[in-house]
Image (spheres, coloured by chain):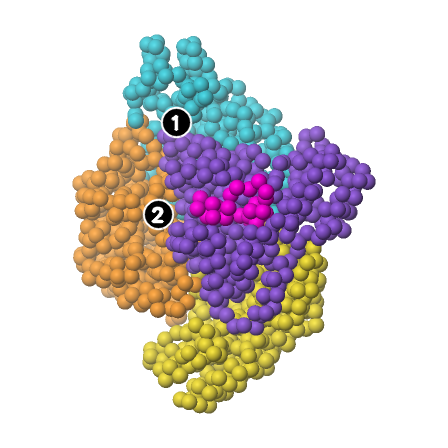
Chain colours: A yellow, B purple, C orange, D cyan
Amino acid sequence: MISSADLSCDYLEGAHPKIIERLAATNLDQDPGYGEDAHCERARGLIRAACDQSGADVHFFVGGTQANAAVIGCAVPAWQCVLAARTGHICDHEAGAIEAGGHKVVALPGVDGKITASQVRDAARAWADDPHRAHILQPGMVYLSQPTEYGTLYGSAELEGIAEACRAHGMLLFVDGARLAYGLAAESNDVSLADVARLADVFTIGGTKCGALFGEAVVVREAGAIPRFFTQIKQRGALLAKGRLLGLQFEVLFEDGLYGRIGERAVREAQRLRGMLAGAGYPPFVDSPTNQVFVAADESLLLALDGRVGFGVWERLEDSRTVIRLATSWATPPGAVDAVGEVLAGL
Amino acid sequence: MISSADLSCDYLEGAHPKIIERLAATNLDQDPGYGEDAHCERARGLIRAACDQSGADVHFFVGGTQANAAVIGCAVPAWQCVLAARTGHICDHEAGAIEAGGHKVVALPGVDGKITASQVRDAARAWADDPHRAHILQPGMVYLSQPTEYGTLYGSAELEGIAEACRAHGMLLFVDGARLAYGLAAESNDVSLADVARLADVFTIGGTKCGALFGEAVVVREAGAIPRFFTQIKQRGALLAKGRLLGLQFEVLFEDGLYGRIGERAVREAQRLRGMLAGAGYPPFVDSPTNQVFVAADESLLLALDGRVGFGVWERLEDSRTVIRLATSWATPPGAVDAVGEVLAGL
Amino acid sequence: MISSADLSCDYLEGAHPKIIERLAATNLDQDPGYGEDAHCERARGLIRAACDQSGADVHFFVGGTQANAAVIGCAVPAWQCVLAARTGHICDHEAGAIEAGGHKVVALPGVDGKITASQVRDAARAWADDPHRAHILQPGMVYLSQPTEYGTLYGSAELEGIAEACRAHGMLLFVDGARLAYGLAAESNDVSLADVARLADVFTIGGTKCGALFGEAVVVREAGAIPRFFTQIKQRGALLAKGRLLGLQFEVLFEDGLYGRIGERAVREAQRLRGMLAGAGYPPFVDSPTNQVFVAADESLLLALDGRVGFGVWERLEDSRTVIRLATSWATPPGAVDAVGEVLAGL
Amino acid sequence: MISSADLSCDYLEGAHPKIIERLAATNLDQDPGYGEDAHCERARGLIRAACDQSGADVHFFVGGTQANAAVIGCAVPAWQCVLAARTGHICDHEAGAIEAGGHKVVALPGVDGKITASQVRDAARAWADDPHRAHILQPGMVYLSQPTEYGTLYGSAELEGIAEACRAHGMLLFVDGARLAYGLAAESNDVSLADVARLADVFTIGGTKCGALFGEAVVVREAGAIPRFFTQIKQRGALLAKGRLLGLQFEVLFEDGLYGRIGERAVREAQRLRGMLAGAGYPPFVDSPTNQVFVAADESLLLALDGRVGFGVWERLEDSRTVIRLATSWATPPGAVDAVGEVLAGL
């Protein structure tokens, strides 16, 4: 249900107007398919430059579940498993896509959606020390989201630590950047795009939630690390025929640094929202500095919001309150957060 | 390489201008995700009406390989295989997507890309008569393309015959309509959209090659015949977050019958092309009435086309000629076919 | 490493002598393959009778991981997941076999290897209440082991409760009886074979650890509930060519109630062992009434056992002790437990 | 149906008496599981020696479909397919096991069950020359059976040629030796076990049909070529708990050259049978020098055999005759072939 103000998620709108303009302007151009066109080529170059990784492979996917499943399915051998925070997107919210591709995801307890280097090391050592280890899947990859599913961010030291633990134990680090633009725009953030690119073996740069109609760029730091990825993407039904549509969108997002700025207003609006809610007696349930705001709502808040502001339901607490999420996006209309203010004023 | 006239395939261009207009006009609307928006709802209704199947399920996919793999993967049980013409798209051109999903495709020899009802019956009976049949996959589905990969069309009687053979042997009929608009627009065609919908258990209505930026509608005649298809689509990474983009495109294609007309010019241009080639001593290699033209090209034709007209290479004949394909689309620029004429004139 | 007394696991030895005799006596008989012989037929009848389920399907597998993977892979649809205790065999000790077959196993925290009906109900309700449930795997099966991997037993009331929770929420109950004979032989056991057969939708009767050379009988209570299971077993490479070898072994185990008695001595010896260890200051780590004995061993016990008694290493405790397992079997030599007594006396 | 003389297949009987003796003699020994026992170790050594490949990996499987699926699944990457004769066992007779594991098998037309080096080269070149090859599976392995499913043998030159074609195009050669003993025992055979081991990257030595109760040894010429094969075997449910049962059988078969001799009588009896049939007007349908005899039977022969001699039904010819198979084994009772003689005499 769409309310008069909708903050239920961050992919309610279409794309940044420059993308629509570019689409219209190039519509009747004739381009080769499957990402072998000039837009894709240029977008790959722009992304490599923005990541400061001139040797990286860049592949474009339409969606995040698809990208996650392809990366894990193609980069992790059959005898290895993936470590992730229990709240990680691949754990519960992708309808078993990773397992359908044959891989086990080991869910680690997280704090505010984050796991730690020491959890990674412990898991690696537990396997290495187990006398039955040949009968057990070896941890082969760490999956984490930046920002996390709870809107929190790994700090630079945290991410360095996890990357080091991965290297020490021969594991890959995969960073899901579905909302990366909102992380880059957060005031407290100290992890740059180039940091992510340097520390992660593979990561995604989210377009769908960050200004594009759709699209996730998968960056593989070491070219060729995922062999014949093109053919494997095709096999997974994840190769877009008119690949230029993806190239064109990432061109717009990266040609003048738009991706680095596009999350700013959303983060600012989310902060304003957090302040309003806290002022009304609803402090943040999770201390998230990005575009997602979580609060534990009582019955009166739920009733007041209902029909006026769209929100997402996250979990029921034992004290009968409900954790809800309000998400802003690069395109959230100016009045949306004010609408929450009005609701709160009327409580 | 893109030549001055490019006839190398039928998905070189973007979308019908009305689709781009609609995209722009609705860009900042806020819509729920995953196909649960009003555009998708309306598009599903329009498609059901155009198919004369009010009870059908309609699902939208971004691409054809994805749609084929999802339909086969979800509709065919583990103990069954799929019959297809050796030239069928799922046989060789989807990088093993069907087998990657666990199913065997049995390639039947075809004529001009088509198989027959008697081949279907023979395969079904061979299984039923085999004393070892419990050790052998049962033919469970017939896959065919309309138009075929060689641009030919099943006639009404042929399709009825295959559908009847399927029913008689408990098999599903799946029609891949990636280029369906070009079939509907062919002069000799006697199979309507409603005929396909009545005869096939599942079929696709191709958007990518027929006027959309991307998108294939999967029509399941009997609602619920593929259980929990939504969740399974999600699991396959094939659920578009901003599903409205698919709904909106099929709305435009179906709201005033555009889909039925959009292939007309392409077919006409292809016919003109066929005539030119035949006149120059290159008769059709396959007698295809739709938008694809196949000829056996000798060295002089190949050389003459090279760099001036983009074409696709299909197969090498034993006499050293090369079968090439020239494809028109709804958006082929007016001069493209004339460019071939100029090349032929210069031979 | 094999010590002078080996209690490292319960499948160190071959088979009950009557099985070897029968093998020898029938060796040059000519029998049809794939389980279609008279031995298999008779064994299926004996098992149905022992289970008091005249309409059940009985299939024979060579091994447990194979049987578990086949049952789950064939009985659970793609959109469902399996609930199991975190210590369940399918969770960590089958090298990801269930996930390799495409299914997610959700690990529930257990107590002494057991889960409860209320955990099952909670998981089912959490899914049903989740507004995003179409994006999430539905709990479709409960997997539990009787006895558990920690040697404990579900009581009759516990099992009834779980079965009821499964029925209430449309879930299957799958009982892994790899060590079932040791459960049936336990003094405190109040769950008969017929109880398991009545409550579980599918269960296994373990042969490998319970007197056979190899073999697990899979009992599907409602015949045909797993469609074309024979073909699917073949497809999984799990169909034994000379199926009679399985039939013959289960014939011996069930023709005069041997299976009900074969665990008795092992359980008695394990109890004696438990007493010895407790008397020496090593109380049971888990209160298991069957053939597996777990104790938290300090350095001195580990050193004393080393090279004299084979044992299994289970987990390291934070206080630096190590949980070890000593397992008896139907064939444990009389002196093995005495050997532990000697070790303890020398501490 | 089992007739008074049964020649319906070559796995009707148990095992060579020496295997049964050894099983009985070692029955209550205590051995570690999963192939880590002394019998397996010794058997691996014996096999390496017999193959003249001291650096090979040897793994034991219970059955052939399992072994084929594991080898192909673990040795062929996702972007490659397997070439095999249309009559190859993996094509139709393993219930889609290879495809269920994700790989496409490309069926090549064979002559008497055999394919040629030039077919292999053509397939490799067709892929390499295809401008769309990134969208197409690359031929990555050749699968062939020695003897073939029609009882024929590759000669030394043929096998060398195929191996050379594989090397030239970066493909693996996998030889299925389910009936290898009957090939080794054939008079016209010029391919030794060491030849197979030198030419194939991976091959199986069949036990099930060649004197064992069950068991196939998989020999990987270059140790480690299939990484973590042990864990992957476990994951596929193909790791036998009491692995010593496999080791022990291959010990017996290889400790004094038994495997090289065990097929002799079966081949001699098959030749006698071929002579009888030809004399009665039923010449061989396929000129097979091993233990399988194929004839095109008319109605009168079928009727005469029915109920007196067990045979297998292979295919119906257009002239209404039926190709049947009569197979001898190392254990075929002396009178079985005579029984066919009596039937023929009575025609």
* Left or right of residue C215: residue A311: right
Q: What percent of the width, then of the height, locates residue B33?
A: 49, 67
Q: Nearer the viewer, residue A69 or A298?
A: A298
> Are labels 1 and 2 assigned to the same chain?
no
Q: Magenta part of the protein: which range?
A: B177-199
**Which residue is found at the position 69% from the left and 47% from the top?**
B7
Where disc 1 sits, the SS reads loop
Q: Is residue A319 above or below residue B63?
A: below
**Which residue is found at the position 55% from the left and 60% from the top?**
B252
Quarter of the picture containing the C terminus of chain B is top right
Q: Nearer the viewer, residue B202 or A98?
A: B202
Q: Nearer the viewer, residue A227 or B337?
A: B337
* Marks 1 & 2, CB-CB < 8 Å contact: no
Amino acid under label 1?
Asp
Q: Which mark is residue D10?
A: 1
Q: What percent of the width, then of the height, locates residue C290?
A: 24, 56
Residue tagged 2 = C67
Amino acid under label 2?
Ala
**Which residue is found at the position 70% from the left and 55% from the top?**
A30
Where disc 2 sits, the SS reads helix
Residue B180 belongs to the span the image colors magenta:
yes
Chain letter of disc 1 in the image: D
